[in-house]
Image (cartoon, coloured by chain):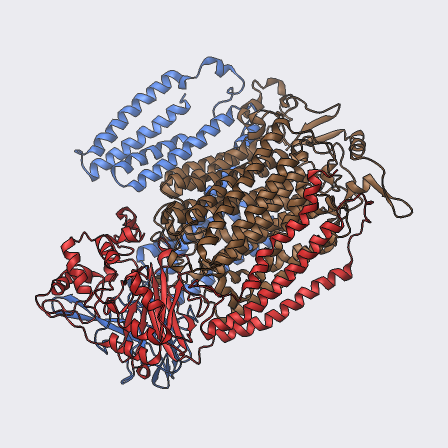
Chain colours: A brown, B red, C blue
Amino acid sequence: MAIIERPSTTAPAVLPTVPSAAFGALKRPVTVSSGWRSWLFTVDHKKLGIMYGAVAMFFFIVGGLEAVLIRLQLAAPDGKVLNADLYNQMFTMHATTMVFLFVMPMASAFANYFLPLQIGARDVAFPRINAFGFWAFLFGGIFINMSWFLGGAADGGWFMYAPNSGPIYSPSHGVDFWALGLQITGIASLTGAVNLIVTVLNMRAPGMSLMRMPIFTWMITVVQFLLLFAMPVITVALFLLMFQRNFDATFFDVAAGADPLLWQHLFWIFGHPEVYILILPSFGIISEVLPVFSRKPLFGYPFVVFSGAAIGFVGWGVWAHHMFASGLGPVSVAVFSVATMAIAVPTGVKVVNWTMTIWGGKLSFPVAMKFALGLVILFTIGGLSGVTHSVAPSDTQQTDTYYIVAHFHYVLFGGAIFGLFSGFYYWWPKVFGKMLSERLGNWNFWLMVIGMNMTFAPMHILGLQGQPRRMYVWTEARAGEGFFNLGFWNLVASIGSLILAVGVLFFLINIFVTARKGKQAPADPWDARSLEWMTSNPPKEHNFDSIPTVGHLDEFFHRKYSESESGQLTQVKSGEEVILDLEKNADAHIHMPSPSYWPIVLALSLPVIAFGLIYSIPVAMVGGAIALLGCYGWALEPSTATDDEIDPPSSGQGKEMVHVG
Amino acid sequence: MVSAGQMVNRLTPVLRRLKFLPLVGFVALAGCASNAPQDTWAPEGPNAQMIDDLQKPIFAVAGIVGLIVFGAIAFAMYKFRDRGQPIPEQTHGKPVLEITLTIIPALILTVIGVFTVRTVFDLAKTSDTEMVINVTGQQWWWEYDYPVQEELGITKPIITSGQLVFPVGTKVMLRQTSRDVIHSYWIPKLNGKRDAVPGRVHLNRLEADQPGIYAGQCTEFCGLSHANMRMEAVALSKEDFAKWVDQQLADYQAPAEGTLAKEGETVFLNQCVRCHQVNGLKRADGTPAIAAPDENVVSGAAPNLSKLMTRNTFAGAMFDLVTPECRADVWDASRETFGEKYLAGVSEECLNQTDLRSWLRNAPEMKPMYANPALLTSTGGKYRGMPYLALSENDIEKLVAYLLTLK
Amino acid sequence: MFTTSSKFYVALTVLAAVSFGVYMILIGPSSIGATALFGMIAVGILFIWLSLHTRDADTDDEFASGAAADAPSRSMWPLVGAAGALLTLIGTLTTPLFFILGLIVVVATFVEWGIQAWADRASSDPAYNAAVRAKILHPIEFPVIAAIGLGVIIISFAEIMLAVERSAGAVLFIIVSSWVLAAGVVVAIKPNMRRGIITVIVVVGSLAIVAGGLLGNASGMREELVKAAEEDHFMHRECGPEKDKYTDKLALESVSSRSAVVATVEFIDGKLVAREQGVPGERETITIPRSNPSSIIFRNKTEGEFRLLAVTGKTMVSEGVYEVDEHCTQLIPAGAEQLLTLTMAKPTLEGGEFYLEVPGVEGQRVELVVP
């Protein structure tokens, strides 16, 4: 809708000025297909997805380097690489970076890029909010890491237990940066969650019922609901923390009658669903990859869907298993112990389904498949060690030792991150039109598998031998002797972390080599099954020339293959032919959203406000003014660019492309 | 000809199988003896034993389930690899199989659940307590105080730190709390860990079968020197414990006039008594010297140094008060001689002069504790741990002589 | 004849002149303020002449254009802006509050005036121009004005409630809320009622509340609250067996922590029974760690109202004069319970220094030991 509409009663001829010129600053940016403007002001879910991925990858490297420093410090007794203060900052930021700035946004990258493609939509429901979410995440991530250069990063651990996070016990501004930075990335997650939920519920292609939705889209949807309910909890907790630190509130102050366990409950009510927020996208990814390379549909699709949803629900009732040693009393401990065992069942269902998916298939093992199978095995190890500490008495021996570190790295590295890597190799040709090198990919995979197991498997031993977590040094006096001595296994873990780092380096080399001279990807390189492959590589700006009507789960596969009377599957069409069919029936009018200046402006106001809250309120007011400006620009800009502002009418090929809001 | 890629594919199942060897290793080697002092699989008291009896079978079950799953995956990867077979039937699952495979783990977990709940309640029992010790954590040391318990010979409260001393075969109840942040008390060979939360009193059962020293570590992240916050729980036979109580309750013996130790007492009264209490110590005018750690330290407490030389450690059990040889002598003593050796306390020959003097010279250099004055603005100038006192070498000499008399 | 900006300067000059007069009377001529205000009058007159002479620096071309052909609409912003500027100046001389208020007024004026002026030139159609202005400004004006209005009403009502007695407050609350409800019902039943009537109802109601708030603020908080503000949670002015007029009200069930306290003390049929957490049996002493907030639950199981009193030594008020340190719960009836949190910085050296007792009951003491 345009803002300026001439009143019909007035004769236009007498008007000396062109009213729309009055809104000159509020025009939509020109739609361009390349150059920095095409990224900065874009609202295209694919471009945003790529940017999410690139930024998350950067933070992965940052978090990885922090991890390597931690391992170097612990390689030998009485390490001298880091001092106590720096070490505490390092492990706090390693976890924060990996959880909030790598795995979550990387899942957002996949979700942004593939969710609309998988449901046959041309974009998400709210493209500008999508852009805002990305910029808020980027600025939030930068904001948190700015603390390194402004007196030290947060040093209370990612769980930030009160009262250790209070101004007395953590006097630097690190925790302030941490709390406010996470608020900002939290805003990004919340807006993203609302956006994707609306998209999934409203914008599916005709014929795609919920139970015909690709499993990745399903898992992402569950994750968005988890985010929608979990982020408010951490938001409240972070506000309490911020008020405690900056405005002398006493939410966790014992002398004022408070109970420090309040923070733990709030944090873990968020923190436990967060675990599923991290792992479910990867479950979704490998549930796409395993069927493709087994040439067989996902075994028990409804079971996988419902177990995912069940995990989402039960995940809210197990938070206190992080607090078995906190002194909750036997009744609470028993209840949460049993609830935790209950959640192992749907998780086990998934492992069974993956195994049954490859059972009886026709398996090929490209790198994407290797990573997917790596997830199944490594996650199972992590899951089984998880069962041992759902048993509360046993957990009181294991919690806060390296056994827990081993457990959740098997789950999050072996699980979440392996799933993401599987997704990289599987979807790279889709996104960039080039195949990642399988040779370098194999190096990448095997070094990561070896490095990962060398790093984290010894931690089982370290933990059971009684080495607690978060210690900046360990001492020879408590190391013991013999096969299980802490010295040897600490050294093995540290060497493993270096191998792991080299493995990741191979991935970066692979990206570089592929970009330089990778081979062009065919339209359907993996003989894939789902909708996102029913378009060119990379997809056109409008995704699909015509929106396909969906008749099956695995629609693409069913268009390519048909069953003969004898039950024999035969290929009737190639992928290219299917895509060509769609192009032939191209829609005459394709409406795409126009770019916008305002998401980035509005997102920029957030770190300014946060900075002001820490250092000086007037700066926060400037930030507030920027936010107001952003809101106004957002609300007032025209909902569409005029035709002459589209440059050039790209890949139109006779079609009329209209950019609308 | 077999390409390299196919080769990798062939080898994959074999290599996969190798990967879970560590897990098999845990199960197989679980019973092996090892010397790590904080080994969680080597219970030496009934509480830890109860946990151990519960967890070992669960580790075994988890290991077996793991082996079955990995076996199935490895088999499938080998058997169903692409050998040019036709595209398999596009089945979407077998609900009966699905439900069966859901119910089996649920049943296993139900059994585990029943035993777990029973153990949880057994470990929370308080009615059979035979002795009570109050344990208070603060950055970065533990204070132990023994309320009056006539039947154990404790006729006056005892307060100590660094080493928790208790009789064997006695059901001890630790009443834990904290003065600042959350800490966690953990002696792996005697029981699981329990957090010490400010404002709350948490209970923790402790019992040892045999005399000896049991090592532990604070396991809730508590700031800079979290890694240096250690525990040593000393179990003494009942007779030896009675002797220890008598030792602790003995009156203060002021050093003789004219000795170096007497000069040390003066230094102590000028400097150390601002934070450190020594029961019975009197000022020159005869009034009792009462420490005021609440005015100088954030946590409001500093270790009570009465009978310092009956302990083997100092600075939150970060340093040994005895030389390595003397330490080994006590730690490695046989069950019979342990009590006697421990009760002998720290003699002048055994005193770890190096660490003690360095500590008195500049404590923050020995142990990280937010000594930077710029970081003390938020605490109103109160220290978090022992500050740098600028003592002269002469004063240190006198102090060491004085501290040696605190038996 | 007056141009837009000349109106502003006229208003500014007049207000400055008035203030100058007031200032001269109240503070006297020999002050910086008087000098500054006089300077302002002079500068104002100069600017009036300048803006009239140059006709606001508008060129004839623009006057000829269609957009500005209409006479400028009436505007209150010159006057408001001038008042704001003056308030700022007064603020620099008196209190920062006026300065900030003046600044806000000036900024608001700039925004309003600027957008008004811009909208006035959007087209030659006043209705359309008004719509443009509304489009931009209403999203700011409505929330801001609503927030200010609501804030004033809420604060006024709070002032009323703090000033009147508890029972009167309850009655007042019922009356006011009934009126609000009644007004709402009337509007709901008669949706076509004249705007004017609704406006009158709302304005009169708001003014009444604001007036009440001012009155309440003037008369101060009720005594009970003043007394309560002088005490903290556990340091009551009255720790004896008699009921305190102000603090011993509604003291039922005020226990925030049911588990994990140091000890539980029960007053059962005239006897004080203490139990320490995790220690079997009754205790004659309760051990509390030094300088650490420790909570004790007190339960009254005797007919009548009792409180638990902790005596924790003496503090020297002046040379040789000591005051006993007392902390107590409120008087609680039989069956009720309350938490007493104690922090003791000094150790007990002799027995019997620190103890718990129930005021008015002899021979029942529980000793507190601080090692």
Q: Quadrant of the C terminus of chain C?
A: bottom left
Residue at x-position 79% and y-position 42%: A557
Residue at x-position 32% and y-position 22%: C47
Judge from the rendering whether residue C368 lies leftward or rightward of residue A498; answer left or right: left
Residue that protrudes farthest toward the top in the picture: C61
Q: Can I make out residue A2 in this image?
A: no
Depth check: give the residue in front, A14 or B391: B391
From the viewer's perspective, is residue A472 above or below residue B208? above
Residue A529 in the image: state x and y as whole percent: 75, 42
Depth check: give the residue in front, C101 or B234: B234
Judge from the rendering whether residue C165 lies leftward or rightward of residue A642; answer left or right: left
Q: Can I make out residue A623 in this image?
A: yes
Q: Quadrant of the N terminus of chain C?
A: top left
Residue A652 in the image: state x and y as whole percent: 72, 24
Judge from the rendering whether residue B197 lies leftward or rightward of residue B370; answer left or right: right
From the viewer's perspective, is residue B58 above or below residue B358? below
Residue A197 in the image: state x and y as whole percent: 64, 46
Residue at x-position 24% and y-position 61%: B293
Depth check: give the residue in front, B81 or A510: B81
